Image: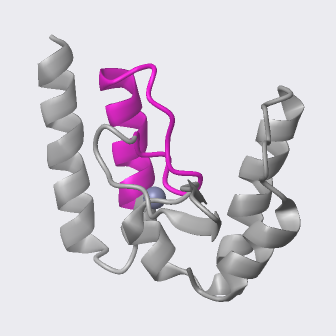
Amino acid sequence: MKWIIILVVYLLMALYFVINPGNNLKISRIKGKVESFLFPGYSTCGRCGRPWKCVDGHTTMHSEGLGCFPLCESCWSALTPKERLPHYRKMYEWWESFGADMGNRSWVAIEKAVLEGK
Ligand SMILES: [Zn+2]
């Protein structure tokens, strides 16, 4: 039953895409909801919500040996460095909110790397 629902949702998405081809983010967000249902427990892209099981994250190396990936390759490519920055900030604040071990991670280094287009 679960697979029939998913198939119907994907067919509706394909139809929507044919009608409205310029609106890829909406399609990606619907895919994100369906895929998150299928693959619970994976964290997701900060923009489209697709789980890392289904899309590759764009890794931004910000310090020696340290990287992070709040966005998938597709979302990362669609945005300018300035537009990407809030997604990195949100990830950074999320890390802080649960007291993650930040090690040598600093916002200054992340912000610099993002604005340099890394
Ligand atoms: Zn994405």
- Indicate whether 14 appears above or below 96: below
Q: From the image, which quarter does the N terminus lie in?
A: top left
Boundaries of the magenta span: 27-51
Q: Position of 79 compared to 83: left or right?
A: left
Q: Position of residue 14 (x, y in %)?
A: 17, 57
In this view, the residue in front, 112 or 70, is 112
- Indicate whether 107 appears above or below 6: below
- Report how many numbered discs are placed on residues in the image: 0
In this view, the residue in front, 51 or 22, is 51
User: Measuring 65% from the left and 84% from the top, which residue is drawn there?
Assistant: 81
39 falls in the magenta region: yes
Q: Position of residue 85 (x, y in %)?
A: 73, 72
In this view, the residue in front, 110 or 63, is 63
**Which picture quadrant has residue 18?**
bottom left
Note whether residue 107 is visible. Answer: yes
In this view, the residue in front, 105 or 77, is 105
**Which picture quadrant has residue 97?**
top right
User: Measuring 63% from the left and 64% from the top, which residue is drawn there?
Assistant: 64
**Which picture quadrant has residue 116?**
bottom right
- Indicate whether 1 appears above or below 117: above
User: Measuring 49% from the left and 41% from the top, which residue is drawn there?
Assistant: 44
User: Measuring 13% from the left and 33% from the top, which residue is drawn there?
Assistant: 7
Note whether residue 83 is visible. Answer: no
Q: From the image, which quarter does the C terminus lie in?
A: bottom right
